[in-house]
Amino acid sequence: MSLVAHALSLVVLVGGDPQVPRVEITPILHTGDPAPGLPGATMVYFLPPQIDGAGNVLIDAFYSSGGESSAGRGLWYGPPGALQLISFTGMQAPDLAPGVVIDFTGDTWLAENGWIGFSGHLSGPGVVSGVNDIANFIGPPGDIRKVLRGADSAPGLEPGTVIDVSSGNGLTPWLSDNATLLVIAWLAGPQVDETNDQAIWIGPRDDLQLIWRKGTEAPGTNGARFAWADGIKFNDNDEIAFRGGLVREGDIDHTNDAGIWAGAPNGMELVIRQGDRPWGMKQGVFVPGTGMGIPALNAHGDLAFGLPLAGDGVTDSNDWSNWIVADGEPRLIVRAGDPVPGLAPDIVFAFAAAERLSQSRVLAFDARFLGNVPLSEDRALFVGGYDSMAIGLREGDPVVGQGGASVYTNLIFAGGRGASNDVGDQMFMVGFQDPQVSEQDIAALALRDHRTGLTYPLVYAGADLGGRTVSLPSPGDGGSIAWWRSGGSDGQWQSFNDNRELAIRLEFENGTHGVFLAHPPAAGDADQNGVLDLNDYAEMFACTGGPGISPSSDDCTVFDIDWDDDVDLLDLGWLQVLFGGSD
């Protein structure tokens, strides 16, 4: 059987072939479909969707009406088959004067608890372009309210300082899992100039607190002031982490003008700064003036980040390091040049990056190796606790469900293509191939289940979904499959939730595209009640046939946990690992 045929046998539609209950791919909306709630309108183009903890999807899309190519932009929210219209072009803007309408939505956000946030460009009575024509709106469906608008007084700042939307940007409502709100805005007013014209607030929608302002004194710097902030992450506890830049006459230059800060309002602390000696490093080693990594943050306030190294004894082979700060204690996770755990002593880390943190304190990062190792096996995903990191998937590992012939290739981690949810599952782009059939890689999205350590391919280039062929030109292509690469408690866009559900936009070879919900195997949950219990355990004994014996019925396939086309003692061992939990 060809590799593509293998791939097609693993991807099914809900309501499709019941004999292959592997991965459910549920269609939600497709180009040309009627726009829900907008009579006569049809869907034209979808942005990457988002998902909440209950599996409801937020769809941000353009639609056409009356033959126009693009008549408006709307937001839809809900489960597949029951979407409700949240916002659309021409809708009365919540909490604003009658006749003030939303021309189109800007950035959108979905919290894990189902709260929605979006910015809206406005028109109507009293709306002045560049003054008060942008606002943000936050809340659960049925209670979405205006929070900030251009020309509003800036919360917590001096009288006369207002929200400035003259650039057409700003007021994006970022939401954490519990709908803690973070807003970044530009400022205007008699006491505002280019040194203090940007601010960040955090908190509930009706009680925002100033947490950062350009031009204010940066903690831990003896009076230097903030010049910029980027790479912002935040959590449910009003804590924020970011890279920041510094200015001060006389002693600030490119060698010490940036750092990482973290904390809550009135409790911000410097974590580390360019020019500092990293914790535990020998005298003479320091963080140079370029290349400091963006921090990762979880619900506990733990931080993970990469630091470049320079100075005494630092060479091209050991000039990068990855760190964790948890409960106030920093620790080195890995340094370039260190031996790779579990491999031959001459195989060392070349680079490790793109750290991801879960609420369950599982850390994941992507690494490349040097030494006596072929290029086809020189990348890996590392997963584990802060003191127990190990290889979770490596290039050359066999693909689950492919009979041992297919192997993973091209772990495409660079550029933030991976995500970790709060329970520690990992989602990432990958290639795979069957060397006995072809040297050509097939691009895929893969899920690593934190409970078993097994990595399941979810959707592939060439897969047939409802008569349409998925288009993924190469494993490194990010345009044909669109999803927001976060699933954790870091305040970022989320397409991957804690139930291993993935909301994705897929493009097809016929030029169309659509939004889908992907769900991995039920893994032993025969009655699909979300918990593995004694009922499932009893069912499995009736299904166990032994190695090489295909499941005796369609209902037994759910117990083939390792996807090797039998139900044997290995699967029973996996069920014991999973038993008693819904994670």
Image: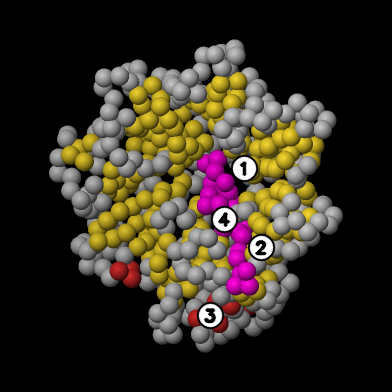
Can you give x and y, in whole percent of width and height, for residue 482 in the image? 57, 58
Image height of 356 relative to 159, above or below: below
Q: Nearer the viewer, mark 4 or mark 1?
A: 1
Question: Is residue 504 a member of the stretch shown in magenta?
Answer: yes
Can you give x and y, in whole percent of width and height, for residue 80 in the image? 73, 58
Residue at coordinates 52% horizontally, 76% vertically from top-left? 401
Quarter of the image containing the C terminus?
A: bottom right
Q: Look at the image and give the residue range highlighted in magenta.
A: 482-511
Image height of 437 relative to 115, above or below: below
For label 2, the SS is strand
Query: Which dot marks residue 514?
Result: 2
Query: Which dot marks residue 4?
Result: 3
* Residue on which the image places disc 1: 107
Mark 2 packing: few (<14 Cα in 10 Å), some, or many (20+)?
many
Mark 3 packing: few (<14 Cα in 10 Å), some, or many (20+)?
some
Mark 1 packing: few (<14 Cα in 10 Å), some, or many (20+)?
some
